[in-house]
Image (cartoon, rainbow, N blue to C red):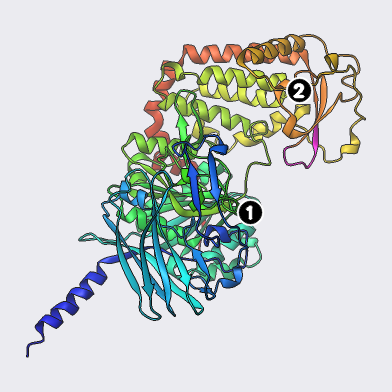
Amino acid sequence: MSTAPAVDRAAKDEADKAAWRTVHRVVFPTDGDTDTLPLYVDFNAAQRVVDGQQGSAKSDSSSTAVITQSTSQRSDFIVDRRRLRLPAHRRISLGTYFNAFPASYWRAHTEVKSVRLLVEVDAVATVVVYRSSARGSSNRVESIRAEGGKPIEVELPITAFGDGGWYWFDLVALDSDVTLTKAEWAVREPEGFVPGTLSIAVTTFNRPEYCVRLMRTLAESPDLLTVLDRLLITDQGTQKVRDEEGYGDAAAGLQGQFDLIEQDNLGGSGGFARGMHETVKDGRSKYVMLLDDDVIVETEGILRAVSFADFTRKPTIVGGHMFNLYERAVLHSFGEEINEYRYTYGTVTTTQESHDFSASNLRTTPWMHRRVDVDYNGWWMCLIPTSIVREIGLALPVFIKWDDAEYGIRAKAHGYRTVSLPGAAVWHMPWTDKDDTIDWQAYFHQRNRWVAAMIYSPYKRGGRMPRESFAVDMRHLLSMQYSAVELRLDALEDVLAGPGHLHENIGTKLPEIRARRAEFEDARVSKDLAAFPDVRRVKPPKRGVKPAAPKSRREALAKVAAGALRQVRPARPGASESPEATVPAMDARWWRLASLDSALVSSADGSGASWYKRDSAQFRAMVARSMALHQKLLTQWDELSEQYKSALPDFTSQEAWAATFEKHGSDKKEL
């Protein structure tokens, strides 16, 4: 009897198996940290969200009712990175940030039509598959009986996920304990599919311990090492990575997949540009992933970003999200966008900032099921195809601020999209406990925003941005923050000088800024609060009413006018001898400080305080200078805009950056 049919079936089964590629594995944390556990496993019973206004994340929270049964986090259920042990008669859901499958993103950006879920358990259990809609409603797809040692596979279409939605599954233990031994999501490989590899580029300044920790993390991830060509660390600090304890062993663990470069401090843009430059020059990697130095990495997210990029219809920038390093279940932002009229960046309007997954997991967060389209992704974690780098150039030479946003805008102008991919993320030190708009970074915030607007703004003379720029100067002046205004005005003068200054001073501007800022009393922070004179109120509040935030535009304008009038008058006698009030950083708003002649203002991180003193002469001089510079910029807008636009390909080119790297050192250490 012929065995051909059986052989053919076996060959077909083998070919079908080979056609699927795993792109998203179910993983668990192994450090016993219950703070991160809600990102991986949902221990709550079935939940339902009733929301009459699910179309908007900004709707009144009272319109949303969450029916939930709260349960404790059980890190003891975790066996290892891939396995979870579930006691009899218990149920858990993998409808979580890291383990649900973001089907709508695959639907929107790839040619993939279906995804296959594979689940393996060691005993009888029930696997319940769910999908969600863009509105966040959950739909039960299928309930499958799983036998120990017999993997279940189910192919699920993603063609109906046009506007949003995820897939996930729940695991139910029956009469005995059950171990989930493996679960993963796979998609079919197209004909001629060739997977890509990547280089990871990290730029660092005096955070050697973070870099060594990252080196160890990557070395301990064998799956990641199979797609990693090399880790490239650009060290721009004075505390060298090579001098950190454990560096040698960590480097050896990367088995030759590591390079260390030391150069002068060229900021984040200079360090990341170096990583891009070296990756393109090396020629091996299809992708370069930019990572901040002060992050904790979920290595599975890196693999997911690479896999997703492999399947996109055309080269696509794939970014990861950022979680708070100090509040591990809190997501900073689900997507970033540019307001082109104001030329500011911020969270996509259909999402919410600082979402806490420990309070509301994926299944009870309707807005998170809607696909979010972004303009750019922060460079805390961002994968960029090297083909895009070759075409549009390296980072903008701006030291810090706006380099990541500008790159996303530039890529979009060349026809390339950015995707912030759920399930790919890092934990990053937050900037919520500092105000970098009034420290040395004020210069870069101002200059780089103007440069970006001059290149890309679709509105005549930048839309509302110039007016807002002047308004910010006034806000700082009413707040007695003269150092910030000085740096912002210096920035405008450099913008007027044209694009030539970008590379010219990238390695020297920071020391100049620090020296200039140190001349102002409001910039001097003392950690010894006892060194300040005692607070002495010169005059009580009018009618005993403390200053309050304006409730309308008219009231705000009235407060500005009153504050400006006070600023041009001499300060009260005694205000320069003793502070009139102590103002916490969170209360240091212009409408509060404008009513004072001096104040002891705490720093945003709580480590010290500065003594703000009103100076009417300084106020008048800076208002006049700000008005003159803004008027000059508006008058010369078209001319300057053309200069920056035409020079963009040159000052972001490999050649221009190579010259800057040569000028500022290019010591390379290969291990």
10 Å crowding of disc 2: few (<14), some (14-19), many (20+): many
Res 590 quadrant in image: top right
Would you say 478 lies left or right of 114 here? right
Q: Position of residue 660 (x, y in %)?
A: 49, 41
Q: Which mark is residue 64?
A: none
Q: What's the magenta region?
A: 604-610
Residue placed most toward the observer, 648 or 354: 354
Taking depth in this image into account, of 244 and 614 the one nearest to the observer is: 614
Query: In this image, 566 relative to 184: left or right?
Result: right
> What is the spatial separation of the Cα atoms under label 1 and label 2, in whole angstroms?
36 Å
Within the image, what quadrant is residue 527 found in? top right
Mark 1 highlights which residue? 207
Rendered-image quadrant of the N terminus: bottom left
Nearer the observer, 25 or 489: 25
Question: Is any part of residue 378 visible from this angle?
Answer: no
Indicate left or right for 102 with 43 as reference.
left
The answer to whether residue 609 is magenta is: yes
The residue drawn where x is 76% and y is 22% is 593
Relative to residue 621, is residue 388 depicted above or below? below
Mark 2 residue element? helix
Q: Looking at the rendered structure, which numbered label has been put on residue 593? A: 2
Is the magenta region chiefly helix, strand or loop?
loop
Magenta region includes residue 557: no
